[in-house]
Amino acid sequence: MLNRRLIRIKTFQALFSEHGQEKSNPSLVAKNVKKSMHGMGSNLLAVLNFLPVFSHYIATEHNPTDYKFNTSEADLKNFDLITKNTFIDNLLQSEKMDAYSKRPTIDWHAEKDSIFAIYKDIKETDFYKLALAMPLSDLNFTEFSKSLYKYLLLDSVAFEQLIEDKNIYWYDEKIPILKSIDKIMETYETNGVIEIPELFKNEKEDLQMADELVEIYFAHKAEIFEIISNYTPGWDSDRITKVDYTLMTMALLEFKYMPMIPVKVTLNEYIEIAKMYSTPKSSKFLNGTLDKILQDWKTQNIIKKIGRGLIE
């Protein structure tokens, strides 16, 4: 779930906040990066946990049998679709979700007003109306749950506002979390088992990459800043944004001091990150500047790659 681009983004965010500071604590910066990386696992569980809490809210606050007037079959079916959902039941029985729900990092139960607003919006969606038109079954419960997660993460303004207040990294983590949920649903549809993916592909290597990026940044940033200035003579430091400075610095550090990372990977990654975080023209500016430095460094034999880094 935690890919290399996200590691770069989380490191960039920490280094960006240190740009221009006279005194920094590299150890503390590295610690904060790793804390943010580990927090993504909890953030996935928090999003997954929204559906069980949502189901509990409907069961306790909107049970049609509590209505003073006669309940319709549609009311009862709506209630059963959400509160008797077998996917949600199985989700709660998984070991990771069971442990998380006992000590959640986000208390959705305290957000009844927001949940009600989301509930009203859900009832107007096409996927909800389709689910009600179909017979209730394990397959329909699963399909409805999958559509509901997708709606929450991509289309629900109320959910977006709610979770942005809880998770300052939501913008970065939303798509990786959605992809992880898609993988969970795919596995569940295939074998009926909830398998929550591991946060790291290789925890040791991923944490080491973050540590190394922070370490070489503070060790060599003055050198790299000077190089950037030499290659951007028409640009004073005020015209180059802090975002662009930080991203260019990180890319150049990878070129020169991280021999296992191919130059094309580095170049492509930081251009894409610039598209996400900087001005519309920044990706072209970064691409042109980095490519110019890269070609000169290759000519001067400054870049020395080994192992996987040799791959062009």
Image (spheres, rainbow, N blue to C red):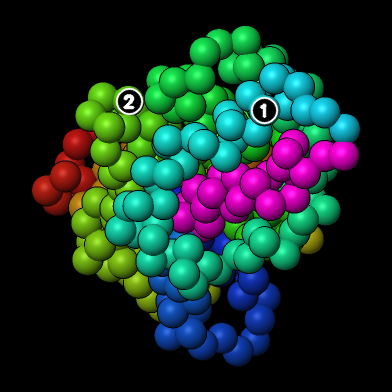
* Amino acid type assigned to the residue bearing label 2 in the image: Glu
Region in magenta: 43-68
Residue 231 in the figure: left or right of residue 139: right
**N-term-proximal mark, 2 vs 1:** 1
Q: Circle 2 — which element?
A: helix
**Does 277 sit above or below residue 46?**
above
Q: Quadrant for residue 181, please give it.
A: top left
* Amino acid type assigned to the residue bearing label 1 in the image: Leu
Separation of marks 2 and 1 at Cα, in angstroms: 26 Å
Picture coordinates of residue 48, whole percent (x, y)? 50, 48
Residue 291 in the figure: left or right of residue 129: left
**Does 278 sit above or below residue 154?**
below
State whether the magenta stretch is mostly helix, strand or loop. helix
Q: Quadrant of the C terminus?
A: top left
User: Label 2 crowding class (10 Å Cα cut-off): few <14, some 14-19, many 20+?
Assistant: some
Q: Badge 1 is on which residue?
A: 76
Query: Which mark is on residue 202?
Result: none
Q: Circle 1 — which element?
A: helix
Front-most of residues 127 and 215: 127
Res. 140 visible in picture: yes
- Residue at far left of view: 307
Residue 133 in the figure: left or right of residue 183: right
Query: Which mark is on residue 189?
Result: 2
